[in-house]
Image (cartoon, grey):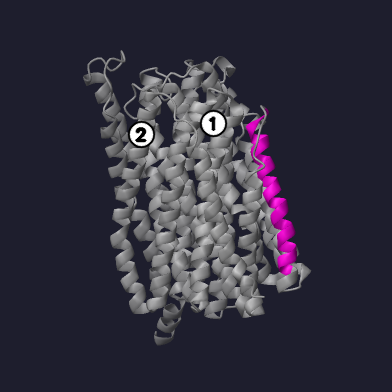
Amino acid sequence: MDLSVVAPVAGLSAMTFAGYLTKRVLKHETGTARMKEISSAIHEGSEAFLKRQYKTGIPVVIVLSGILALTLGPFTMLAFIIGAVATSLAGYLGMSVAVRANVRTANAARRGLSDALNIAFYGGAVMGLSVTGLALLGISALYYLKLDLTQLLGFSFGAAVIALFARVGGGIYTKAADIGADLVGKIEAGIPEDDPRNPAVIADNVGDNVGDVAGMGADLFQSHVCTLIACMITGNMLYGVNGVVLPLLMCAAGIFATILGSLMVRTKGENPLLAINKGIFTAGIIAVIAFYFATQQTLGDLNVFYAILSGVITAVLLALVTQYYTSYDRPPVRAIARAAQSGPAINILTGLATGLVSTAPTVIILCATILISYSFAGFYGILIAAMGMHAVTGMIVAVDSYGPITDNASGIVEMANLGQKAREITDKLDSVGNTTKTVCKIFAIADAVLSELALFITFFITVGLTAISIIKPEVATGLFIGSTLPFILGSFCLRAVGNAAFEMIEEVRRQFREIEGLMEGRTKPDYGRCIDISTRSALKGMTAPVILSITAPIAIGLTLGVEALGGLLIGSIAGVMLFATFMANTGGAWDNAKKFIEAGHFGGKGTPTHAAAVVGDTVGDPFKDTAGPSLNVLITVVNVIALLFAGYFLAYAILM
């Protein structure tokens, strides 16, 4: 039996189950006329941004398709286009269900916690299953077309380019709106979060969907396919066809494990985080058992299975570390909340200190994984450990998308005046969502590091290198430039958010000042104007990061050679591992410190302590939702381009 047929079957199963969950979500009531009105505005704004984002990306895809056709051939171009389309489709399907789930979650909160949790999680699971299902279907289709495995890298490149637009653009959009809504609404006007009088509130809710649902989905889509393709290429070199089939079987097993794990996410009133963790651990255990049998059927080497297991354990350990540093029932976040009593400066300093120290356990875990997996199966062990981390990618994306659904639900409850009981339930779900979103961001960062390491190893093998010497000046130059890239790219993202937020703040102030009756609730704000500001700013802010990530590896490869390019790649991977982890954990900790105060601690809402925490959270928002996670995709593009054009870099070096 050809075991590779399991892959497309699993992909189809994922899409079928996603359809089933969509039906379950949509059968629930949407609530009052006011709730429907708010939900419709969020839905329309989200779809409008996604369409404009895709329209902006189409010319880029067309130009890059032409370049690939001329340089690497029509099949690489075909793979590129399919990768771009699959990523776009996954983002659209997942976000479309998520924006419909938020109002239904809000309405269910009037009945109780259990129904609200189920709707929110199932809405997020559609995104998770769409990501893993379409990824496996796309790669399986190309594999059965008998493409050269290196041509599959075109699929990775297409996915990464679309992910750039989704992650960077979505991140800029959401944080511009969030900062404007918080600084003017909460601090200056003294009105609650998600108050309908705030002109930026709908744009903020739209941003949650385009940034944390479509953006994160695209992010993990591209890292998922990058790791899979790198494993297929290297596995084929080392083990032949069985080395290609194993990672396909692992992805298939992950899909079935995600489906079964999703059915375990239920609660009867206890902490929703326990219910979500139950689903994640169930999926992980099922996947590990399946990996054992898949390894035995293909390679028959237990050492490879042990390397896989190290990757799975890594994912679990990273989740626990992230929960420790970002959950508001843990000491680090409570220390940040306590520091807010001394004002925003001490709050920010304590948050920065927490984020900096949080990089240590993350790096130690990743380094241990690299050493352990290598000891079992060499370089292939590192690659397959990265695949092990992908065991439950569908579940990870599901719990991430759950976060913005509950966040939007809290906003709808506030704007529709559904009462204190519903607000308490959605706030409880939202607090868990903040933790799961941060866990997923750290997973995406760590996953990206191992994925890029997989691409780096594949690059080394492809260009025939066995080692590079850092005492060579060109290699050291590449290393330092690569280490600097994450900081430059992060700067572009933060500056774009700052510029957009400045314009947003001025617009919110103008509406509060000029629209008669707005503060009294007699007149509606102009939500559309704020949505337009975020949209324009996001599309404008994407340009510089995209150009830099595409041109940097080409410039180094053509001027300094493949060894210097290897230095660039390893430097960029190390830089992302540290800088992105720091920003994601710091932002998540500041956010939950604010929520801890809002729950009634240290004086609660409306106090100077709360105002200081809001400032810290505002600084952290672009850390955790724009710059930090955007680095994953930007560095993927650098690595994929290096591998795609490796032959040209080698030929150029010979000619020179």
Q: Amino acid at mark 1?
A: Asp
Residue at the top extreme, as displayed: 520
Would you name the residue on which mark 2 appears?
40
Q: Amino acid at mark 2?
A: Ser
* Dot 2 or dot 1, earlier in sequence: 2
Disc number lying in front (2 or 1): 2
Q: Identify which residue is drawn at 30% across, 66% down.
A: 62
Residue in the foreground of this view, choosing between 649 and 173 = 173
Secondary structure category for the residue under label 2:
helix
- CA gap, disc 2 to disc 1? 21 Å
Residue in the foreground of this view, choosing between 367 and 113 = 113
Left-right relation of 438 to 301: left
Image location of residue 626, percent across then percent down: 44, 44
Residue in the foreground of this view, choosing between 332 and 540 = 540
Left-right relation of 430 to 626: right
Residue 165 vertical position relative to residue 328 in the rendered view, above or below: below
The answer to whether residue 108 shows anywhere in this view is: yes
Q: Name the main secondary structure of what is drawn in magenta.
A: helix
Bounds of the magenta segment: 270-295
Q: Identify which residue is drawn at 53% across, 36% down.
A: 120
Image location of residue 177, percent across then percent down: 36, 34
- The N terminus appears in which quarter of the rendering? bottom right
Crowding around mark 2 (Cα neighbors within 10 Å: few <14, some 14 to 19, many 20+) is some
Image location of residue 568, percent across then percent down: 49, 65
- The C terminus appears in which quarter of the rendering? bottom left
Would you name the residue on which mark 1 appears?
430
Specify whether residue 284 is painted magenta.
yes
